[in-house]
Image: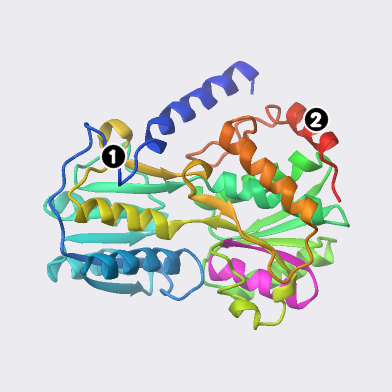
């Protein structure tokens, strides 16, 4: 791919998201759609549970915080299979809830269909994009997972001794692809010659498959494992940590969830987690409804984006793991570089695909020389 075409693609992606990052639920713009204040909210998970330690739980916590703070009638429904998406949403509709939060990329079509059929109910879709088919009662929450992946990929490269790191991923949908490509780009930012291993697994709820993948990567020399695939990824990092390998969590701080606030064996091997504040996104969109404020409109792709610039993306502390302070300082410096635009991930912020293998190489080489691995 030519540099000119890459530049055009990058510009198009940035233009698509730039207006969105400026919009927040507390400072509605003049063009935002006015809302009728709500008194109830219902949440439908992706396949999984509200205590699964990853994005379902974070979405639930955001909804519950808003419900408790604003006195909202609330309910959650845990999805058992993808075929249940529409029926679960219909349950919320039929029970009279005024706002419905649905979680996950795969439930997007069912969410859009329900929003179209029920124009007087507000719908919030986590990890969903509706810019190509906007509705006034529908908003998608997007995250720069590539930025989170980039941060922890840099951490992995700074901590590896073997020069090989691995990633256990869930289904290859855009949020997961953004995590993977961001992680691998971040690792190469520190060391262009680092070896990155990775696999997509066709389930978010198979910790045993995650563990098998982690075992294979350890056998291939990986000494840092990133898990980004719900309980599947968590199964991978739990196995690896208990086998004595350094690991990195995702979405929430997995020291608190997967490793039970440090009580679960292997907690001392968790060096960080790629933080994606799903809870903040859900809370802010519900807050906007309660206060009668506006949501992003069709002109803003009906999308609310959380990034490093609005504290929607970050990385968790090392807790019990032995991570040198200078390593944390280097990752923090990269975080600041992502904020001010002096560092780019090289990953499309919507699809997760690499913009170009060439775009990041000179910068990565220069920065790697300036900040050598410990």
Question: Measured along the vertical axis of the image, is residue 199 above or below residue 139?
Answer: below
Residue neighbourhood size for the residue with mark 2, other residues' Cα within 10 Å, grouped as few (<14), some (14–19), many (≥20): few
The residue lying at 25 percent from left, 50 percent from top is 288
- Per the image, is 275 magenta? no
The residue lying at 64 percent from left, 19 percent from top is 3
How many angstroms separate mark 2 from mark 1 (CA)?
Answer: 39 Å
Structure colour scheme: rainbow
The residue lying at 50 percent from left, 23 percent from top is 11
Where does residue 92 sit, x and y in percent of width and height?
20, 68
- Per the image, is 249 magenta? yes
Where does residue 234 sit, x and y in percent of width and height?
60, 70
In the picture, measured across the screen, residue 53 lies left or right of residue 208, that is left
Residue 83: in sight, yes or no? no
Taking depth in this image into account, of 97 and 62 the one nearest to the observer is 62
- Element marked by disc 1: loop
Where does residue 60 sit, x and y in percent of width and height?
37, 68
- Considering only order in the chain, which callout, 1 or 2, is on the residue closer to the N terminus? 1
The residue lying at 32 percent from left, 33 percent from top is 300
Residue 241: in sight, yes or no? yes
In the picture, measured across the screen, residue 131 lies left or right of residue 215, that is left
Mark 2, residue position? 366
Q: What stretch is highlighted in magenta?
A: 230-250
Location of the N terminus by quadrant is top right
Where does residue 111 sit, x and y in percent of width and height?
27, 55
Q: Which residue lies furthest to the top in this view?
A: 4
In the picture, measured across the screen, residue 223 lies left or right of residue 213, that is right
Quarter where residue 243 is shown? bottom right
Mark 1, residue position? 296
Identify the mark at residue 80; answer none if there is no mark: none
| Disc 2 + disc 1, Cβ < 8 Å | no
Question: Measured along the vertical axis of the image, is residue 208 above or below residue 288?
Answer: below
- Element marked by disc 2: helix
């Amino acid at each position: 791919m030519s540099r000119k075409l890459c530049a055009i693609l990058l510009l198009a992606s940035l233009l698509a998201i730039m207006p969105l990052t400026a919009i927040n639920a507390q400072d509605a713009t003049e063009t935002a759609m006015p809302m009728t204040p709500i008194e109830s909210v219902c949440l439908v998970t992706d396949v999984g549970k509200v205590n699964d330690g990853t994005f379902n739980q974070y979405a639930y916590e955001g909804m519950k915080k808003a419900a408790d703070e604003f006195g909202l009638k609330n309910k959650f429904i845990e999805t058992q299979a993808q075929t249940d998406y529409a029926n679960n949403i219909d349950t919320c509709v039929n029970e009279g809830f005024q706002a419905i939060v649905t979680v996950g990329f795969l439930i997007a079509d069912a969410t859009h269909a329900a929003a179209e059929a029920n124009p007087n109910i507000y719908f919030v879709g986590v990890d969903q994009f509706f810019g190509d088919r906007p509705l006034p009662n529908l908003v998608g929450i997007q995250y720069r997972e590539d930025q989170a992946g980039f941060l922890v990929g840099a951490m992995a490269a700074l901590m590896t001794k073997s020069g090989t790191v691995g990633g256990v991923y869930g289904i290859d949908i855009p949020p997961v692809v953004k995590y993977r490509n961001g992680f691998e780009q971040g690792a190469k930012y520190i060391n262009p010659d680092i070896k990155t291993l990775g696999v997509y697994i066709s389930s978010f709820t198979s910790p045993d498959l995650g563990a098998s993948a982690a075992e294979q990567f350890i056998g291939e020399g990986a000494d840092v494992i990133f898990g980004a695939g719900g309980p599947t990824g968590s199964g991978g990092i739990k196995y690896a940590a208990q086998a004595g390998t350094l690991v990195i969590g995702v979405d929430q701080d997995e020291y608190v969830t997967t490793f039970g606030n440090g009580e679960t064996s292997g907690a001392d091997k968790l060096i960080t987690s790629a933080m994606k504040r799903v809870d903040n996104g859900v809370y802010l969109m519900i807050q906007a409804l309660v206060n009668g404020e506006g949501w992003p409109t069709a002109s803003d792709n009906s999308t609310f984006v959380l990034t490093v610039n609005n504290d929607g993306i970050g990385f968790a502390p090392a807790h019990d793991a032995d991570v040198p302070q200078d390593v944390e300082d280097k990752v923090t410096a990269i975080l600041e570089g992502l904020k001010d635009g002096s560092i780019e991930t090289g990953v499309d912020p919507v699809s997760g695909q690499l913009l170009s293998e060439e775009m990041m190489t000179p910068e990565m080489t220069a920065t790697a020389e300036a900040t050598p691995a410990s």
